[in-house]
Amino acid sequence: MIGLRDDTDSTLPPLPPPSQAPAVAARLFAAEGLLATHLQLEHRPQQSQMGRSVAAALAADDPLLFEAGTGVGKSLAYLLPGIVHAMSQSRQMIVSTHTISLQEQLETKDLPLCRRVLASSPETASYAAFKSCVLIGKSNYLCTTRLSHALAERASLFTDDDYSELQRIADWAESTDTGVRHDLRPPPRPEVWEMVSADSSSCSRKHCDCERCFYQRARSRLRAAQVIIVNHALLFALINAGGARAQGGGGDSRGVLFPDDFVVLDEAHTVPEVASDNFGLHLSSYGVDRMLKYLFNPKTKRGLLAKVAGREVTQLVLDGLEASRRFFEALSAHLLTQRPLARLREAGPVESMLEGPLAALERAIAKVADRMEEGRQRDEYLEQKQRLKALQAGLNEWLQLAQAGHVYWAERSGRRQTIVTLRSAPIDIAPALRDHLFGCGTSVICTSATLAVGGQLEVFARRIGAESARAIAVASPFDFEANMRVYVAADVPLPSPQEARLALDCLIDYVRFCTQCVDGGTLVLFTSYSDMRAVAQALESEWRAAERPFLMQGEAMSRTELSKEMRRLGNAILFGTESFWTGVDIPGDALAQVIVTRLPFDPPTHPVLEARSDAIREAGGNPFSELTLPEALIKFRQGIGRLIRTTTDRGLITILDSRVLAKSYGRLFLDSLPQPRFERITRADREAKFKPYPRSGAA
């Protein structure tokens, strides 16, 4: 009979058991559920709604967009149902974040908490046995097989200085548990590490002792884990490299990264930018130089080819190095003399002088490999051949503007601005995400405190190709009206070339005043490095003289280190740009004020924004209202969200951009504040109106 199936037919695959996530989520997140009764956590209806919604989406393998305001407890709301679903279905949950700090929080705080709550009741105890791991790039691991080979072949591969570094790595290998590069201090020199890292086909289960090789051991833990934590950049790089299909899934199998997995994207507001960055080209003069010198370094006379290849082959490497130098110099002279970043609008800006030398070198390496017996060494040479082939393909694509729907550009970077990088990105990332993420037949959960624009999630859904996803937004449970005061400076000159000096002087004056008035820590958010450096130059000596700690992005410490230092100091002033608008989590008096110096509009001259704006105009739309403004609103909400991180936090938001008052779109920024009241201030009346909260515990 058509449409019926005989379930007794043993040739048919058995139906998977129903997911236990919805039933267990109801038990966990109820008012008298396990979170409240066993962990004494306050019942939050918003968290309960999110936990149940995530469980339902996972059980149905549906996509879900969920905006959860600060304090909802979204990590537990997706981790607990995700763990139950993974365990009951024998599947893997990929949890991807944008920031290291959230990754660390999930690994060291939230997952142990999940284990505790699941173990607290007999009906959920079996789920507490879940395994988790952090997925990092292959190049971060030491391969003991490659290390042994490097030590054996040191004469042809290393100078005396490099051999000393190699020996330091070998000594560390005897004591490290992880074999991860970041655990070696000081960090290894890149040119030595690349000779021993796992980023090679010679590091494989075929060639390595899986009990000794750090990467192969990590792979074993990965295969056994139900929860895998990764960052967005690596996730999308792996998806672009083939995703689940490249990991052994067939063409019809479901899964994003591994066969039959499901994905949670936390800090999902960053997904469009990170995905775009990893679905395009990224070829640099520095990278080409390193790739060729890995084969043979003319200064040291060492490298992979030094022992097995004759002078003719090593001369091909020298030819490639010279062609690379001339190619990137010509490209820089043609495109980058006036500015450090330029869009490529026409194919063939310079002669493709690298194509011949790279092709000749590729053929020569193939001949060297053909003379070798099957094994680890031959595999490594064949891999170098493939890398040269991929480099040629990338260069040709860039020079010919070959990928339809992509924007191409070049940029200068490095301390001396001598590194030239060839870049490309999709103009619209939605089709790629629709195919490689939301079209994989598995559940994808996107969550953040800031996905909506004007209270609507549709703009974000279209941006990432998730139009079919269910979209829900819940507000923060925090009392912002009681714990947040908002001040808007009404007398700061509007940004313009004519008023630039006056506006900067006004910024300096306001930052000085606001930081003097607030005893706790202040985060000052900039949109311009030059503005940040100018204000720092004007005020840093004053703060040093007053023994007020001052921290600034771009100096010795990373964002994570700066955040930790700000927490420790308790009353520091921290200056940050782009990356500091999101992901900074400093509760208490250590962050008592956030100053927004300018509304976070992206520069309209960047090639990607320019190309997207052109596409919107061609379709009859308005680039400012459809692209620039929505992205600025989300970023603004992220910056404001740095202030109140716990129920007891109190503090000030000070906005030094008068466009929120003078421009029609300004109301959208004010409406996106978590509390509706704000106070206008000017330099004439600010001393009377500006009222910080007393420090915690103060009378």
Image: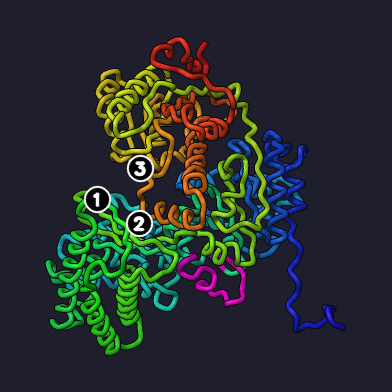
Q: Which residue is mark 2?
A: 181
Q: Which residue is mark 1?
A: 339
In terms of sequence position, does the residue under pointer 2 or pointer 3 come before the other? 2
**Residue 154 in sight:** no
Looking at the rendering, the stretch of residues picked out in magenta corresponds to: 239-258
3 vs 1, front mark:
1
Tell me where residue 332 appears, x and y as whole percent.
Answer: 21, 59
Who's the residue at 49% across and 56% down the image? 230
Who's the residue at 34% across and 74% down the image? 393
Q: Examine the residues drawn in magenta and state their main secondary structure.
A: loop
Residue 543 higher or lower than 270, as above or below: above
The amino acid type, in three-letter code, at marker 2 is Arg
Q: Which residue is mark 3?
A: 558
Label 1 – label 2 distance at C-alpha: 35 Å
How dense is the environment of label 3, judged by Cα within 10 Å: few (below 14), some, or many (20 and up)?
A: few
Q: Secondary structure at mark 3?
A: loop
Q: Is residue 264 left or right of residue 655?
A: right
